[in-house]
């Protein structure tokens, strides 16, 4: 019930800022439609536009709002961390978004030679998956990875997707190659930042030597062809 009330509040606030909704409301009044009928028709349009906008945003970020049913074991784990129902839901939605973004990045990196080379240099996907698992095991540390979850990861997903789209063009001009080169440089920088995110997250628990050894271990696992999957990880 609380969720629906919050949705109604958001839709109402959205309607006050939507030119389309306000325009429809005024048109209905001008042509003589009853005030309350105009109000509810406009509110219905606002709801439609609000959820359409939300779906579009979710598609861009890789976010999936519908979560799998939480197992009793996982629920007990979250409760042992002192998390409320709202905190658990927010955490699960955030991590589901991150999971989808990592999987999309992995797919894009595998489909372009340049991106594959960058991945081989920084071991980005494996590091991102490792950090994902570290966060799911330490949900109270979510605030420590803000830049990873809300800046670096979605930026890398968007940029790698656009890179692959352009790279797959049948014909490329000089400007196209320049765009690809600049994009790959930015992607390389984002990959370095994600490795740094992992190092900073682990710095409280491990000293510099241990972190370097762990990063080296991830590289060895990759070179040995061990595929670290997070698709089946419960959130």
Image (cartoon, rainbow, N blue to C red):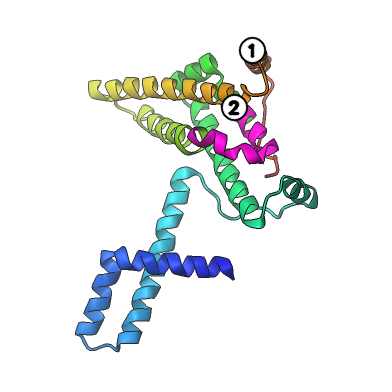
Residue under the point 33% across and 28% down: 170
Query: Residue 211: x percent and y percent?
Result: 64, 16
Query: Residue 86: x percent and y percent?
Result: 62, 56
Name the residue beneath numbered marker 2.
201
Q: Which mark is residue 77?
A: none
Residue under the point 42% across and 52% down: 56
Is residue 131 something one can see in this rendering?
A: yes
- Above or below residue 116? Residue 48 is below
First of labels 2, 1 by sequence position: 2
- Above or below residue 223? Residue 11 is below
Q: Nearer the viewer, mark 2 or mark 1?
A: 2
Secondary structure at badge 2 equals helix
Name the residue beneath numbered marker 1.
216
**In the image: residue 27, left or right of residue 3:** left
Which region of the structure is painted magenta?
Answer: 130-147
Q: Residue furthest left?
A: 30
Whether 46 is among the magenta residues is no
Residues under labels 2 and 1: Cα distance?
17 Å
Query: Residue 6: x percent and y percent?
Result: 50, 66
Q: Residue furthest right?
A: 73
* Most frequent secondary structure within the magenta stretch: helix
In which quadrant is the N terminus drawn? bottom right
Q: Nearer the viewer, residue 106 or 208?
A: 208
- Above or below residue 80? Residue 27 is below
Query: Residue 226: x percent and y percent?
Result: 69, 21
Residue under the point 61% across and 21% down: 203
Q: How many residues crowd around disc 1 within 10 Å: few (fewer than 14), some, or many (20 or more)?
A: few
Secondary structure at badge 1 equals helix
In which quadrant is the C terminus drawn? top right
Is residue 102 something one can see in this rendering?
A: no
Whether 138 is among the magenta residues is yes
**In the image: residue 215, left or right of residue 52:** right
């Amino acid at each position: 019930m609380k969720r629906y009330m919050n949705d109604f509040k958001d839709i109402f606030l959205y309607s006050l800022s939507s030119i389309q909704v306000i325009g429809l409301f005024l048109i209905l009044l001008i042509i003589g439609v009853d005030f309350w009928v105009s109000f509810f028709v406009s509110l219905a349009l606002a709801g439609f536009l609000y959820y359409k906008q939300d779906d579009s945003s979710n598609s861009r970020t890789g976010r999936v709002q519908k979560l799998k049913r939480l197992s009793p074991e996982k629920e007990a784990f979250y409760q042992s961390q002192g998390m409320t129902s709202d905190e658990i839901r927010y955490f699960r939605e955030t991590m589901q978004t991150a999971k989808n973004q990592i999987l999309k990045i992995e797919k894009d990196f595998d489909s372009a030679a340049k991106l594959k080379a960058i991945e081989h240099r920084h071991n980005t996907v494996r590091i991102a998956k490792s950090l994902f698992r570290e966060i799911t095991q330490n949900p109270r540390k979510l605030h420590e990875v803000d830049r990873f979850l809300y800046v670096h990861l979605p930026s890398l997903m968007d940029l790698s997707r656009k890179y692959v789209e352009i790279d797959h063009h049948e014909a490329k001009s000089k400007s196209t190659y320049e765009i690809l080169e600049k994009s790959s440089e930015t992607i390389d920088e984002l990959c370095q930042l994600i490795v740094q995110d992992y190092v900073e997250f682990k710095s409280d628990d491990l000293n510099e030597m241990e972190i370097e050894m762990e990063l080296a271990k991830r590289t060895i696992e990759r070179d040995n062809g061990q595929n670290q999957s997070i698709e089946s990880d419960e959130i």
